[in-house]
């Protein structure tokens, strides 16, 4: 399996949603595991007002490269997810690999503000 570089990862959620014909649809589960680029995708989901259309998020968080060194910014994204209605129901912390002290966590979040009447 070929590894994707940053240039291959799309983080433009609104554009991707439109090109896929998903403008007025909801997502039951959105799984994000893109090796530290999840922060940019989450920022775009929040700024594009797409969070209300997602019932559940499963995210693997990474905080170990230059792109994720601004911890204040990462905390603000996490707080914004909570404000959008996402509550953590599960979380596992583990090592990224056996040779470093880098950690990652996989979390499940449920959107308690999801409108089941709007998106049945």
Image (cartoon, grey):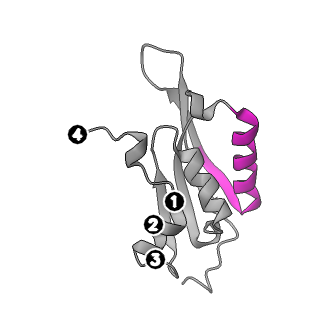
Residue at the far left in the pictured view: 1
Q: 12 above or below 7?
A: below
- Answer yes or no: do the residues labelled 3 and 2 have beta carbons within 8 Å? no
Which residue does the numbered mark 4 point to in the structure image? 1
- Residue 22 is tagged as 3
| Residue at point 54%, 68% (across, down) | 14
> Which quadrant does the C terminus fall into?
bottom right
Q: Nearer the viewer, residue 1 or 15?
A: 15
Q: Nearer the viewer, residue 115 or 53?
A: 53
In the picture provided, is 70 more to the left or to the right than 120?
A: right
Q: Is residue 63 visible?
A: no
Element class at badge 1 = loop
Q: Residues in magenta?
A: 70-90
Element class at badge 3 = loop
Q: Is residue 50 visible?
A: yes
Q: Residue 22, position in %: x, y?
A: 46, 77
In the picture provided, is 93 more to the left or to the right than 32?
A: right
- Residue 16 is tagged as 2
The Cα atoms of the two marked residues, 3 and 4, are separated by 28 Å
Q: Residues within 10 Å of mark 3 (few under 14, many from 20)?
A: few
The Cα atoms of the two marked residues, 2 and 1, are separated by 6 Å
- Residue 12 is tagged as 1
User: Which tag, 4 or 2, sits closer to the chain's start?
Assistant: 4
Q: Nearer the viewer, residue 33 or 37?
A: 37
């Amino acid at each position: 399996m070929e590894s994707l570089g940053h240039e291959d990862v799309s983080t433009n959620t609104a554009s991707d949603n439109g090109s896929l014909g998903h403008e007025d649809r909801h997502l039951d589960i959105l799984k994000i595991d893109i090796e530290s680029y999840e922060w940019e995708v989450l920022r775009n989901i929040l700024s594009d007002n797409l969070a209300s259309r997602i019932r559940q998020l499963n995210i693997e968080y990474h905080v170990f490269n230059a792109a994720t060194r601004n911890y204040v910014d990462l905390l603000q994204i996490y707080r914004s997810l909570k404000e959008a209605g996402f509550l953590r129901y599960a979380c596992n912390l583990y090592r990224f690999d056996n040779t470093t002290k880098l950690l990652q966590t996989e979390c499940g979040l449920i959107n308690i503000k999801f409108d089941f009447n709007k998106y049945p």
